[in-house]
Amino acid sequence: MGQKTNPIGARLGIIRGWDSNWFATKTDYSKKLIEDNKIRNYLNARINKGGISKIVIERTLNKLIVTIHTSKPGIIIGKGGGEVDRIKEELKKLCGKDDVQINILEIRRPELDANIVADTIARQLENRINYKRAIKMSIASALRMGAEGIKVKVGGRLGGAEIARSEEIKQGRTPLHTLRMDIDYANVFALTVYGKIGIKVWICKGEVLGKRDLNPNMVAGGKDMGERQGGFERRDDRRGGGERRGGSDRDRRGGGRRN
């Protein structure tokens, strides 16, 4: 079952918060839901190469707050902040609201964000780079930045083959059933000249112990990731200790042979 359930949805309310924060009654719930979908689709198409990871939408009484998590804030902000002002005016026309606020949060380690990793692989496939090379480069970058495990699955006419197939490459561990494991997930399509190729990425960032703030804007700041890095160091120390003990046993065996 863990292989068929979206790992983000399974962890909502446990270690991950919602990307849309607002309250609605039965009469206007569907209207706000459709409006959120329009905002996300518009921003993803409008800022196609902005390295967008996720868009968090919050609503107060008469105010709409849109927070864009991106690895390339300079592209979205523009020269002197002019691009943000244009996007704000376009969102006002799209939603029919007068008070729209746009916040931009920078993702300092894009190698650990599933959406950005999947989007990077998709861009490389569209430029006709070998899919295995693109996937292995992304896996190496994620593990180098401190991920516990990463799994990438691609499906379609890989390499322009006549028959579509799917391939999966993984390294490390991605325990989908363990809900306290922080696993990021993304599903992106690459529009190649020989058809559409689907890309799925799972990134395990480590174990979350204790209560976490479920505000999605707080999680993206990197505080929790720093705590997980400390856990990685402790595990590395234990492994180092095991290697030292093994070395001493070999020394003792070597001493026995000399006698």
Image: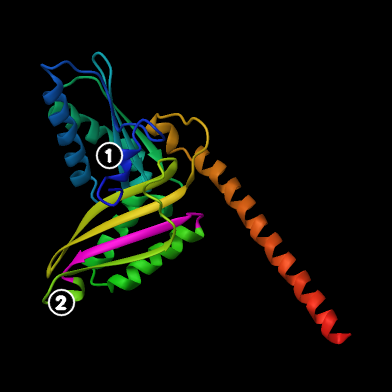
Which quadrant is the C terminus positioned in? bottom right
Using residue 4 as the reference point, say whether residue 93 is left or right of it.
left
Q: Eyeballing the image, is 9 above or below 245? A: above
The reply to whether callout 1 and callout 2 are in contact (CB within 8 Å) is no
Using residue 54 as the reference point, say whether residue 137 is left or right of it.
right
Q: Amino acid at mark 1?
A: Glu
Q: Amino acid at mark 2?
A: Ala
Q: Eyeballing the image, is 129 above or below 13? A: below
Q: Is residue 51 visible?
A: no
The residue that label 1 is drawn on is 83
**Is residue 224 found inside the magenta-colored segment of the image?**
no
Residue 245 is marked as: none
The magenta segment is 145-157
Question: Callout 1: 10 Å neighbours few (<14), some, many (20+)?
Answer: some
Q: Position of residue 201 (x, y in %)?
A: 32, 55
The image quarter containing residue 81 is top left
Q: Position of residue 43 (x, y in %)?
A: 21, 40
Magenta: main secondary structure: strand
Query: Looking at the image, which residue is at 26% across and 45% down?
Result: 5
Query: Looking at the image, which residue is at 40% across and 58% down?
Result: 150
- Give the mark, 1 or 2, whose residue is nearer the N terminus: 1
The residue that label 2 is drawn on is 161
Using residue 239 as the reference point, say whether residue 176 is left or right of it.
left
